Amino acid sequence: MPEEYLLAARKVSKKFCRDLRRALHYGLLDIGNELLGKSNKHDDLRRDEFWAVKDVSFEMKPGDSVAILGRNGAGKSTLLRMITGKLRLDQGEIRVRGRMAAINELGAGFNHLQTGRENVYNAASLYGLTREQTDEIYEKIVDFAEVRNFMDSPVANFSSGMKARLGYAVTAHLQPDLFVMDEVLAVGDILFRKKCLDHLKNYREKGRTILMATHDLFRIQSICNRCLVMEAGKIAFDGDVAEGINYFLDLLVSGRDDEISRAIVSELKSQVMERDILLKEVKVKKKTRPKVVIKSLQLSPCVGDVINRGDQVQVQMDYVVSKEIREATWVFSIYLADKPQYVAGGFSAFDGIRYLLNKGRGQLKCTISNFHLKPGKYCVRGLLIGRNGLHLAKFDSNSEASSFSVMGTAVAAEEASGNPEESSNILKIKWQ
């Protein structure tokens, strides 16, 4: 393995058998073959066998933060278990340089008959730490886990959340060169997940390496700089995080005729792209940005002065550009006026619409039919994006010009409260 790589996987494959009795029979045959010096590494599948992971190859350099996405059964967890040594490979090889720590199942490695304190020292010793070295980090582990009053109690008495806290705290404070996680951010309460996220951001900023499998699409945008998407045991995508998320969302709705699912995925894509642009904005020097200014962004009824629920509504953006810009994308997002909660929006590129912005002043419009947001007050934000994904201009104002109210009467008993937070976020948009 080249020295610049911390992890290298080459043609990694793993097969399983769907039938338990037949799997036990195959296992005995394979053990016998190994005792006789015969190889079990072949491409032939026996009855009821299937490839859970097939011919997966990728590398990671120090400082990489890689997310693995995929539908359930795509092979994510199987791949991570092979990387961490919990499963044997049927084909290929995996090489890791440096110390690796893994959290596949929070708290799964604990001895439930021992106390929390004893489990901390046992786990640390498995990673090569002496008792003196563990003494130095013990208080940090306990403070992070926030279970100090229970450290001398058997882990069997811990709740699942307490095990999750302690399991993450122990592994995180071992300071490994490679930190491997499987659905860690899906466990625990919201404050614990935020603490884990903050720790991972700090860990990444120190140049450490992270490999994680998750379904948390928005959090990986804050943590990872690369995304792998697995499908049917193979890597179907390897590249930018936002592009990987969009690829994964397309996989979710492929072969579906469900219009609602497709609309929801379209809205998710819009939020992913907007978040990606905002995250990348701080990394782009101002001198590299084209001179574009969004002068105003408004929603208005097509008829009358008041937006009523169910009306046809027009969205209008006025802008000024210093030079011609080709293939620009227009994004608008609707939020609650009193707090930063996304409600609905549109992304022209997802409908195949890109714009030519001529030098000087210009105007973009689109029409929303059956504007069904519930009665309440909202504000609108906007973005213009170049064809390379570069943020050209942003409109993010809470002024009266960008705010609007939706009026109307409830159409069902469950809508009587008129709570705008419960509004559906699926809009039918005609771009002009």
Image (cartoon, helix red, strand yellow):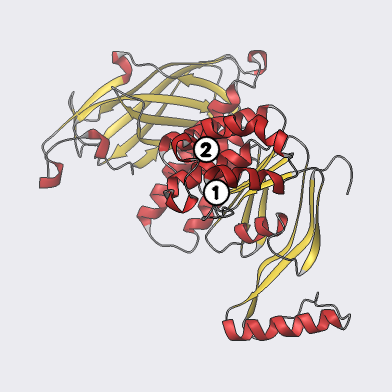
Q: Quadrant of residue 291?
A: top right
The amino acid marked with disc number 1 is: Thr
The reply to whether residue 251 is visible in this rendering is: yes
- Locate residue 276 relative to residue 304 in the image: left or right: right
SS for callout 1: loop
Above or below residue 407? Residue 150 is below
The amino acid marked with disc number 2 is: Arg
The residue that disc 1 covers is: 214
Q: Answer whether labels 1 and 2 touch (C-beta < 8 Å).
A: yes
Q: CA distance from mark 1 to mark 2?
A: 9 Å
In the image, 353 versus 142, the foreground residue is 142
Above or below residue 291? Residue 378 is below
SS for callout 2: helix
- Percent x, y of residue 158: 44, 48
- Percent x, y of residue 155: 49, 50
The residue that disc 2 covers is: 219
Which mark is drawn over residue 252? Answer: none
The reply to whether residue 329 is visible in this rendering is: no
Residue at image point 70% right, 38% down: 131
- Percent x, y of residue 164: 50, 45
